[in-house]
Image (tube, rainbow, N blue to C red):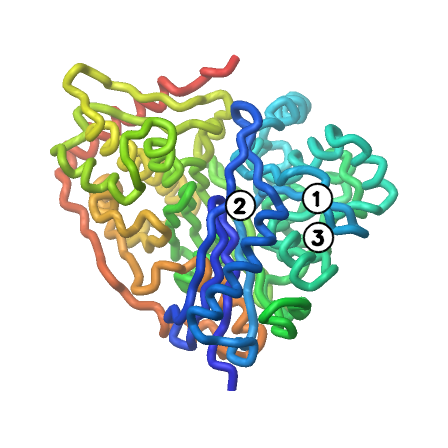
């Protein structure tokens, strides 16, 4: 009897392999960072080959640390940074260019071009998404237009496109070109109703259908790993990272929501088996599809910069030496000193969708110190989450009673308490906070019978800590009003 399920968690800054037991507990893990490449302001790239090497390395390292072999692993799931775009040669498997990361803004001229013909929301009813630099379809269009020979090769059927899940599948299985519905829903090329590539969108964006992977469910056996220490183990789950966290938090009922605090911040609410088109600036996305069951959908608010702001304070400004120093520095002052940081480094995502916004620090006086800036940086994540949650409650007409949280920043107790205060909602951290990887493991385990059903998964979920709001209503209103003024200062920086 195989006792464990593995999950490849390929994120924006690192790749991890985590092994879980039947109770959802971590029994082994390994992690490796990869380079962030910035060729020009607003451009963000990753090396696809480095990501493959790191994936192989963390699988081997985790198995060694846990004294495990392929005989112990029932199956593997994949979860991945979404929208990040790779284009590679079908025969050789070599990428034609670095991956264009979801944060990359080089396609802004294409966004403006297509928006001018029918508005930013011209494809929202069909795809759930506004026109924005965030999504994969226009990144693929840029590669086809700007990499020498790419369009000719694509039209001849010699190239493959994929988000990182498809790139990993190609490598791990030696040739399976496949993606799941959650990742496909982030390309702006898939029809939300049919769950298939949309011919009219492909024609509009000038995307040859031959480059696209087959769309599959989030939980089925896609193939077996073809090399390395897990050779022969089936890959049976694929979920975009935020959808994986929703599954890992067992938000299976309409109205249940989670917020993941990572490089960016992503709040998703399950809306059931019908897509809900947002009127408040959110996106509609596929939450998951388990095998042949109907797909479940979600409303999502995407915040581009949260944990990445802490990294920026560390790497670009040198205010801290390591990311875990931010809490103590921020806690050394009683409040933010009327300092606000709006981290619109790639424009503002939900619910504003303002690509011409840029980051600002406002309210500075001689009184302000690096501690106030550090505190303002943490609070920026909480304010942005409040904006998204307000939009979500407006669209769904559901008032949340609690917010389930996960991701690297939830160990920051100062942030979690401020989040509860500014939302006026309880914030709940589960016992297992690696919910993204856990969700991918759950998808794979359901496909192979390792876990029986969603009720089995719900029994694994438990509370580690709850933060309850303690801020006076008047103070909450004052702080949020000042945040809104700061956001207004960030707008229209780019002409």
The local secondary structure at tag 1 comes to: loop
10 Å neighbourhood of mark 2: few (<14), some, or many (≥20)?
many
The local secondary structure at tag 2 comes to: strand
Please tell me whether residue 436 is drawn above or below residue 412 in the rendered image: below
Residue 3 is situated, as x and y percent measured from the top left of the image, at 47, 80
The local secondary structure at tag 3 comes to: strand
CA gap, disc 1 and disc 2: 30 Å
**Mark 3 and mark 2 in contact (Cβ < 8 Å)?**
no
Disc 1: which residue: 95
Q: Measuring 84% from the left and 46% from the top, which residue is drawn there?
A: 157
Q: Is residue 118 visible?
A: no
Residue 489 shown left or right of residue 202 in the figure: left
Q: Measuring 52% from the left and 53% from the top, which residue is drawn there?
A: 10
Judge by depth and name the residue closer to the eye, 210 or 471: 210
Residue 275 is situated, as x and y percent measured from the top left of the image, at 55, 50
Give whichever of discs 2 and 3 has the lower sequence position: 3
Disc 2: which residue: 284
Disc 3: which residue: 196
Q: Measuring 37% from the left and 41% from the top, which residue is drawn there?
A: 307
Judge by depth and name the residue closer to the eye, 14 or 119: 14
**Mark 2 and mark 1 in contact (Cβ < 8 Å)?**
no
Please tell me whether residue 452 is drawn above or below residue 347 in the rendered image: below
Residue 231 shown left or right of residue 274 in the figure: right
Please tell me whether residue 362 is drawn above or below residue 214 in the rendered image: above
Please tell me whether residue 191 is drawn above or below residue 145 in the rendered image: below
**Mark 3 and mark 1 in contact (Cβ < 8 Å)?**
no
Residue 418 is situated, as x and y percent measured from the top left of the image, at 22, 42
Residue 305 is situated, as x and y percent measured from the top left of the image, at 41, 36
10 Å neighbourhood of mark 1: few (<14), some, or many (≥20)?
some
Q: Residue furthest bottom?
A: 1
Q: Measuring 75% from the left and 48% from the top, which residue is drawn there?
A: 160
């Amino acid at each position: 009897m195989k006792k464990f399920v593995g999950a490849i968690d390929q994120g924006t800054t690192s790749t991890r392999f985590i092994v879980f037991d039947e109770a959802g507990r971590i029994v082994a893990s390994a992690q490796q960072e990869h380079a962030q490449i910035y060729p020009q302001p607003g451009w963000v790239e990753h090396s696809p080959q480095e990501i493959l090497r790191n994936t192989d390395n963390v699988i081997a390292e985790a198995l060694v640390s846990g004294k495990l072999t392929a005989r112990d692993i029932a199956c593997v799931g994949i979860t991945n940074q979404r929208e990040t775009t790779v284009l590679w040669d079908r025969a050789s498997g070599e990428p034609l260019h670095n991956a264009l990361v979801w944060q990359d803004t080089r396609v802004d001229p294409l966004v403006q071009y297509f928006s001018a013909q029918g508005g930013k929301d011209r494809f929202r009813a069909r795809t759930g998404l506004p026109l924005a630099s965030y999504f994969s379809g226009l990144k693929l269009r840029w590669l086809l237009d700007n990499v020498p020979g790419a369009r000719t090769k694509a039209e001849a059927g010699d190239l493959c496109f994929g988000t990182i899940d498809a790139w990993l599948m190609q490598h791990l299985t030696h040739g399976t070109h496949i993606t799941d519905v959650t990742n496909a829903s982030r390309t702006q090329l898939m029809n939300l109703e049919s769950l298939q590539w949309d011919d009219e969108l492909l024609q509009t964006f000038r995307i040859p259908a031959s480059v696209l992977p087959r769309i599959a469910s989030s939980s089925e056996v896609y193939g077996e790993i073809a090399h390395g220490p897990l050779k022969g183990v089936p890959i049976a789950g694929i979920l975009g990272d935020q959808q994986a966290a929703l599954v890992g938090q067992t938000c299976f009922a309409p109205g249940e929501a989670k917020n993941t605090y990572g490089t960016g911040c992503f709040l998703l609410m399950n809306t059931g088996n019908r897509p809900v088109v947002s009127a408040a600036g959110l996106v509609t996305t596929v939450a998951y599809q388990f095998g042949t069951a109907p797909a479940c959908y979600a409303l999502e608010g995407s915040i581009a910069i949260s944990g990445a702001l802490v990294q920026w304070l560390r790497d670009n400004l040198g205010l801290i030496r390591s990311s875990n120093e931010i809490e103590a520095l921020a806690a050394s002052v009683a409040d933010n000193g009327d300092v606000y940081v709006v981290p619109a480094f790639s424009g503002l995502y939900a619910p504003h969708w303002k690509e011409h916004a840029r980051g600002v620090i406002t309210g500075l006086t001689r009184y302000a110190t690096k501690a106030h800036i550090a505190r303002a940086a943490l609070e920026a994540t909480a304010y942005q989450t409040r904006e998204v949650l307000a939009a979500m409650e407006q669209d769904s007409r559901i008032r949340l009673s609690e917010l389930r949280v996960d991701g690297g920043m939830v160990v920051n107790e100062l942030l979690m308490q401020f989040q509860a205060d500014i939302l006026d909602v309880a914030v709940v951290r589960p016992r297992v906070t690696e919910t993204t990887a856990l969700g991918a493991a759950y998808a794979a385990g359901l496909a192979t019978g390792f876990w029986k059903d969603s009720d089995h998964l719900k029994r694994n979920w438990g509370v580690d800590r709850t933060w309850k709001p303690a801020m006076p209503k008047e103070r909450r209103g004052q702080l949020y009003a000042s945040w809104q003024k700061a956001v207004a200062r960030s707008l229209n920086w780019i002409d």
